Image (tube, rainbow, N blue to C red):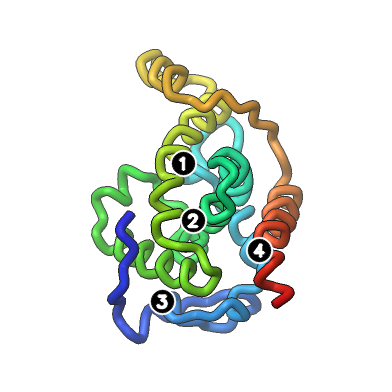
């Protein structure tokens, strides 16, 4: 993902938190209270909510943050890479590929997230292979009746993790605690 450096100002004004509007391209850390991010991501289901079982975006990001290796920048990028979905909703990848506007919103929000939380652009790019591969594990967990060819592709490309169903509350709390662990240094300075 090439992070957008030149985004329209002001950006889209969106509701966040307790009904306050923020500029999706020009926010600060205090505009996005961490527990509200975790709660919001826990309410978004991967793959648009399709499937026999649900994985929230919070659970996805939480798991991914452990799978990208020891680099803290990459762990942080993995945890926050889907935060723009708080504004756009969880858009399945085939639609993102077709919708230039969604890609622009994602890039502008991601660029701002990186700036606000100190995550370099290269870290978001570095997690892409892991993000793609975890989706195969998620498909195998979520769908009981995949086409045989799709199941074979998923089996060949999965990371091989064991996914456990969790409640939205557990997903939100886990995401929030992981955020505080990964970003602790910046919070105490």
Circle 3 is placed at which residue position? 25
Disc number lying in front (4 or 2): 4
Circle 1 is placed at which residue position? 131
Helix, strand or loop at label 1? It is helix
> On screen, 75 above or below 188?
above
Of labels 3 and 4, earlier in sequence is: 3
Hey, which residue is sitting farthest bottom in the picture? 10
User: Disc 4 versus disc 1: distance between alpha carbons?
Assistant: 21 Å
Of labels 3 and 1, earlier in sequence is: 3
User: Disc 3 versus disc 1: distance between alpha carbons?
Assistant: 23 Å
> On screen, 172 above or below 46?
below
Helix, strand or loop at label 3? It is loop
Q: Tell me where residue 160 appears, x and y as whole percent.
A: 56, 23
Q: Residues within 10 Å of mark 4 (few under 14, many from 20)?
A: some
Q: Is 6 or 149 nearer to us in this picture?
A: 6
User: Disc 4 versus disc 2: distance between alpha carbons?
Assistant: 14 Å
Q: Tell me where residue 76 appears, x and y as whole percent.
A: 57, 56
Disc number lying in front (3 or 4): 4
Q: Are the residues tagged 2 and 1 within 8 Å (C-beta)?
A: yes
Q: Are the residues tagged 4 and 2 within 8 Å (C-beta)?
A: no
**Residue at the (57%, 27%) spot, across then down:** 141
Q: Quadrant of the N terminus?
A: bottom left
Of labels 2 and 1, earlier in sequence is: 2
Circle 4 is placed at which residue position? 183
**Residue at the (53%, 56%) spot, across then down:** 73
User: Does residue 156 appear left or right of residue 160 in this picture?
Assistant: left
Q: Residues within 10 Å of mark 1 (few under 14, many from 20)?
A: some
Of labels 4 and 1, earlier in sequence is: 1
Instruction: Work out whether residue 56 can be spotted.
Output: no
Q: Is 9 or 55 nearer to us in this picture?
A: 9
Q: Tell me where residue 2 appears, x and y as whole percent.
A: 30, 58
Circle 2 is placed at which residue position? 81
């Amino acid at each position: 993902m090439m992070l957008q450096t030149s985004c329209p100002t002001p950006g889209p004004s969106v509701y966040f938190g307790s009904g306050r509007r923020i500029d999706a391209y020009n926010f600060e850390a205090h505009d996005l209270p961490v527990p509200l991010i975790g709660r919001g991501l826990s309410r978004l289901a991967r793959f648009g909510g399709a499937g026999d079982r649900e994985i929230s975006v919070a659970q996805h990001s939480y798991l991914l943050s452990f799978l990208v290796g020891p680099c803290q920048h990459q762990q942080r990028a993995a945890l926050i890479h889907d935060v723009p979905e708080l504004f756009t909703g969880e858009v399945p990848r085939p639609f993102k590929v077709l919708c230039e506007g969604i890609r622009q919103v994602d890039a502008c929000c991601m660029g701002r997230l990186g700036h606000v939380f100190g995550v370099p652009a290269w870290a978001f790019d570095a997690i892409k292979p892991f993000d793609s591969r975890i989706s195969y594990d998620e498909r195998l967990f979520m769908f009981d009746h995949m086409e045989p060819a799709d199941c074979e592709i998923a089996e060949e490309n999965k990371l091989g993790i064991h996914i456990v169903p969790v409640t939205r509350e557990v997903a939100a709390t886990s995401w929030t605690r992981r955020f505080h662990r990964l970003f602790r240094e910046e919070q105490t300075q």
